Image: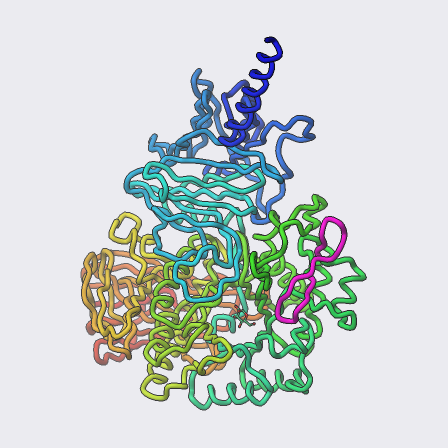
Amino acid sequence: MTKLIKSIVLALLVLICFVSQALGEIIGSVQTFQDMGNGIELNCTNAYLSIELITPEIARVRVGVKRPGAESRYLEDFSYAIREDLPKIKSSYKVKDNGKSILLSTTAIDVVISKNPVLLTFLDKEGFCLSEDFSPMSWLPAPEGQSVTCTKSLSYGEHFYGLGEKTGPLDKRRSKCVMWNTGEYGDDIRSDPLYQSHPFFIGLKENKAYGIFFDNTYRTHFDMGHTFEDRYIFRSEGGELDYYFIAGPLVKDVVKRFSFLTGYMPLPPIWALGHMICRWSYYPETEVMDIARRARAEEIPLDVIWLDIHYMDGYRCFTWDKSRFPDLSGMVSKLHAMGYKVVSMINPGIKADPRYFVFKEGIQRDAFVKYPHGGLYIGKVWPKECVFPDFTRLDVRKWWGSLYNGLLEAGIDGFWNDMNEPDIFHPQTGTMDDNAVFNDFGLNSSHKKIHNVYGSYMAKATLEGISRLMGKKRAFVLSRAGYSGLQRYAASWTGDNTSNFDHLRLQIPMFLNMGLSGTPFIGSDIGGFFKSASAELLVRWYQASSLVPLMREHNCRGEYDQEPWVHGDPYKSFIRKYINMRYRLLPYLYTCFYEASKDGSPIMRPLLYEYQQDSNTFTLDDQFLIGRDILVAPVLQEGAVRRLVYLPKGNWYDYETKDVLEGNRSMYYDAPLSMLPVFIKEGAILPTKEPGLYTTEKSIETITLEIFPLQTRDSSTSILYMDDGVTKDSPFVLFEFDMKKTENNLCIEFTRKGAFDGIKSFDVKVYSGPPRKVIIDNEETEFRYEDGVIYLTTTKDVKLVELIY
Ligand code: GLC
């Protein structure tokens, strides 16, 4: 009998164990807590919970599951995303035990921790609940760390943005997605996951924004109210629950604070803002030179020609095919003499060929990823059997970086890191085997943990390597794969899209969410990669991309040619017009890049970024802003010759006609194939220059300031940043233009900082009726008035321009 009872009890215990394992373990209740000097740590039933204050607005939440015999409470404290030089900021805070809950408060937020069960609520200083746990944080045992889950309440009317490179609309409410870097081929417009992983989102709730960065590199899942109407969930398949709560209240604040954590894009060389063309692949040399001469003959501004994999010798990275390119450096110098730059591709897969120097060197250094038993991991990519560098190792990154020397010596100007998800021709997984081992700072972690950061760390190795070799010159790297923080190393493009209007359309919310996820330097293959673009699609794609940060046309092998001139006139003139517009607006665009490099402001912004109080902007994702003042509303539908445009509050100028349009309304706008609808915010001062056939062909000595007078507001500020566009520590100049309007008067005050003296004078164009007189620095000055434009000239030292009406 006792035996029977014992067996029943044992069976019950096994069952309880099994059920609790299946349901997972929850954090439990608070037993004790202590002040850590930078936040608090709570000793809970099943885990330690630390809430560390990074700044008064940013709190890091970590759950260290109690593991019998574990040496430390938490997993290793290293992030592949957070910048290495994150400043340590001492935030003052107060902790109060309120019996049933604990209050941790800073000058910006209150965190309420209910004790039983442990639930976190983040409030602003007005007591508004920004975010609260729906159920206790929980986990299941996983082979590496835990499979952790965090579930938060979803309010009616809450919107979500960010999550990086995802298909679908701008607002991610009711969507779900997975973060697992994936080389995607084909034309499904809903594909998920894609090439990059950005486990960061912004919640916008009654016009107040907050952000959450779930810093977990394992495969993660986000369910933003897709499965349950009242909650959203993020979870991982390994690692630890480690997230940053970032307070707003502006979306802008959240993006800047997230960028403060994950770092800023270095200012690229100015040529990287130019128009670029690519093909899989331009070869041999004669074809590259034909393209170069053709673009100049067609007077289509072009800065960069790209070399895809066929320039290599049998797909061996860091070599080139001597029959296709007998004199690579000679060709590159000819291109340089024509004003071009050349970017070439480097993939992570190294051909397993014992006669190939990179393979040999890598083997000697034990640089390649292995299986746990010590055998080399081998995967098939373009050159067939390949091995893969372990970029988590500093010595491997240094070695890899040094391999670029040969190509740099041949004159190559920048590098394109592709297939770095890593994308492997594996019929089931499309990537490496899960048990491949990476050094991971001595932790010997599996591919499951490193997969999502492999691309970022390849880009890091590339950028750091070429920066060392290039001395003072700025480097340019483009990467297909990435994790949050990638912007510190590379620009991104959205991979292998398809030539159709659906793909053109979906690029816009994708770019916008990339910008909101801290990755401002982004673009797509103009015209579409797979299939062939019709003349109409090519024109519309070029128009939509004319001010997008990265402007590169690219096309798959075997498709019809897609260069801007292939369809002849009128199409090529339509395309030329908007490439010229980009080159004219280069000083404005470069200033936007400068701002992004300083504080993470997206270059391409959703309207809600600037007009957060206007709920009409919350789901608007077929038009966008470049910087603060240029609104672009491209035509994204086949056959359409007009579209609905939403202009937020204030007056706007039609950039084509300079007509003034009232905002706070939607309007139909005629946009035949020759037209890209562009609108400029009243009060804007756009710095422009003569376009030229490449970014530096025409000097910046004279900048033309296009002035769009204030109408409904009284003041505005614009800036212009300029430097030599080439060196890392170039002197710079930063002009600030303060515009003020009174009844009969428009004044522009100029202030200047910095020693760069490339800009000598300003041509000024004011779009308004004729003034009675113009006074520059207290002296009445001559001006010309023609067709609604006032023309003036002045020097860089000007202080005050007054227009008296
Ligand atoms: C990948 C890239 C594409 C490139 C091709 C050949 O598909 O995404 O841009 O042209 O590989 O290298």
Horizontal and vertical percent position of residue 539: 35, 77
Residue 730: quadrant of the picture: bottom right
Outermost residue toward the right in this view: 364
Task: Tell me if residue 568 can be seen.
Answer: yes
Q: Disc count in the image? A: 0
Front one among 94 and 292: 292
In the image, residue 383 lies in the stretch drawn in magenta? yes
Task: Tell me if residue 724 can be seen.
Answer: no
Q: How is the model colour-coded? A: rainbow
Task: Identify the image quadrant of the N terminus.
Answer: top right
Please tell me whether the stretch drawn in magenta is mainly helix, strand or loop: loop
Up-down relation of residue 422 to residue 696 (above or below): above
Horizontal and vertical percent position of residue 529: 45, 72
Classify the position of ligand 1 by quadrant: top left, top right, bottom left or bottom right.
bottom right
Residue 421: quadrant of the picture: bottom right
Horizontal and vertical percent position of residue 595: 45, 58
For image coordinates 52% across by 27% down, the residue present is: 20
For image coordinates 22% across by 71% down, the residue present is: 642
Up-down relation of residue 113 to residue 143 (above or below): above
Outermost residue toward the front in this view: 1
Up-down relation of residue 45 to residue 626 (above or below): above
Up-down relation of residue 722 to residue 329 (above or below): above
Please report the bounds of the magenta region as a residue range: 369-387
Task: Identify the image quadrant of the C terminus.
Answer: bottom left
Horizontal and vertical percent position of residue 688: 39, 73
In the image, residue 320 lies in the stretch drawn in magenta? no
For image coordinates 37% across by 48% down, the residue present is: 175
Direction from residue 775 to residue 223 in the image, left or right: right
